Image (tube, helix red, strand yellow):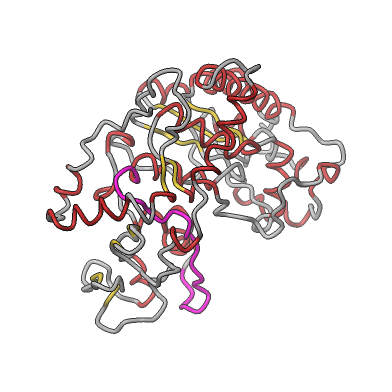
Amino acid sequence: MLRPLLWLPWLPWLVTGFDETQLLQRVASASSAARGCSSPLVKYAMPKAPKELRNLRWVHFPKAGWSFVTTLWQFACGQRDVLDLSQTTFNHSEWPKLPYKDEVELFWPDRIIMHRYPRGRYCNDEVFGHQNVQTLHSPVSLKEMDQRKWQVIAMFRKPSQRLLSAFYYNGMFAPGIGPRLAELHEKCDRPACFARFPGIAGCYARMLTNSTCAEQDEDSFDSGKARLPEALQVLHAMSFVGLSEKWDLSICLFHRMFGGKVNIGQLQDLHKGPAHEESYNESLLEGFEDEVDEAIYRAAVEKFQGLLREYVGDDADRELLEALETACGEILNPPSETCSCAKVGRECGFDPGIGLDCGECPRARLRVLGLDPDETALECSAEGRCIIEEEEEGLFQW
C-alpha cells in the first residue's frame, strides 16, 4: 500500500478554518461520490517504500507535455480533497482584449489551476520548497541542481514529434529565438524548413544547460553539440523522467515512485494545438534528424526503463507492467459529471453532492473588468457562485 505524503491529513483542513461538521461532511463526500476521481494505486504491491519528493523542479520542454502540471498540483496540493483538474480552459473571447502577458497569467491551463487552488491554502509547501513554482519553459543546469538541492523531473517527447508539434502550434513555437522569429516566419512554411532553421535543433540540450529552447545567436549555433555531455549529466541526475509517448504509464510510475493519489485530470491533454494528432507524419521533416536531442531522448528512454525495472519489477514481467499501465484507467473511470464542477454549475467551494472541491474564485480575473483584485470584494456563495458587486455572468465559470 502506498505511504501517504508526510503531512497529517486533517491538519490542513483545521488550519484553513473548516469546523468539525464541515470536516466530517467532506470526508463522507470524498469517500463516496468523488472517490473515483482521485485514487491511490493500492491494488498493485509496491516493491519498496515511496521516495520523498522535496524541493521539486519541473523542466517543461516546449510541446513535450504541458499537461504534466496537473500531476505536480495533484501530488503537492490534491492529496486532501478531490480537486477538479480536468477543467482548464476558459473562453475569454467575449471579454475585453488583454495584453498577451495578462492572458498568459489569467487563462493558460497552469494558471487556471493555480488560481483555483492557490499554493498557500492547498499545497504541501515542502514539495516545492522556497522557490516559485516554474511551469513555463525555464531551464536548469547541473550547477543549479547542486546548489539549490533541486529534485528535477521532466517529461521527454520524441524530438521529431516535438518539432512537428512546435511547427503547428501558434505560428511556429520557438521560445528563445527572439527577433529572428520574423525571419523564421518569412523563410519557412513547412516543417522541414522549420526544423533546419538555425537555432531550432538542440532544444533539450540547451534547456538542460541553462539556456532557452531555441537559440538566438545564429553564429554560435551548433545544434547543441557542445552542450550534450553536460545535458546527459543533468538527465542522469534527475529524480524522475517520463515519456510523453507513454503518458498514462509515466503518470502511474510517478505515483508508484513517490506515492499519492492519481486524479482523473492527470490523464487528459490540457493544451492541444490546432493540428493536434497522436502522432505526426515524420516524413514531413524530409529526412531531418535532431541528432543531439535524439541522443538525449535515447538516454531518457533508457532511464525511464530503468525506473520501471526498479519500481515495477524486471522488464520481462510483462503481466505486472501491463497491470500498471492499465491501473489508472481501471481506477479512474467515473462518469464525467462526477468529477466536474462545470457539470453541476459550481464556480467555487466544496460541493457535498459530488464530494468535489471547486476551489477559490480566481480573483485575478477581476482585471478583465478593469477592477483591482486587491480592492474588490469577491466571495463564494453557499451555492458555489463567485459574487462581486455587479456579477458578470461567465467570468468565473470553468
In-image side of 391 versus 102 (left or right): left
- Residue 257: x and y, percent? 44, 26
At 27% from the left and 76% from the top, the residue drawn is 387
Front residue of 319/259: it is: 319
Front residue of 10/372: it is: 10
Answer above or below: position of 285 versus 102: above
Residue 183 visible here: no
At 68% from the left and 60% from the top, the residue drawn is 274
- Residue 35: x and y, percent? 39, 49
What residue occupies the far bottom of the structure in this picture? 390
Front residue of 284/121: it is: 121
- Residue 13: x and y, percent? 19, 49
Q: Is residue 86 magenta?
A: yes
What are the residue bounds of the magenta stretch?
A: 78-98
| Snapshot quadrant of residue 351 | bottom left
In which quadrant will I find the C terminus?
A: bottom left
Answer above or below: position of 244 versus 33: above
Answer above or below: position of 363 versus 34: below
- Residue 45: x and y, percent? 45, 24
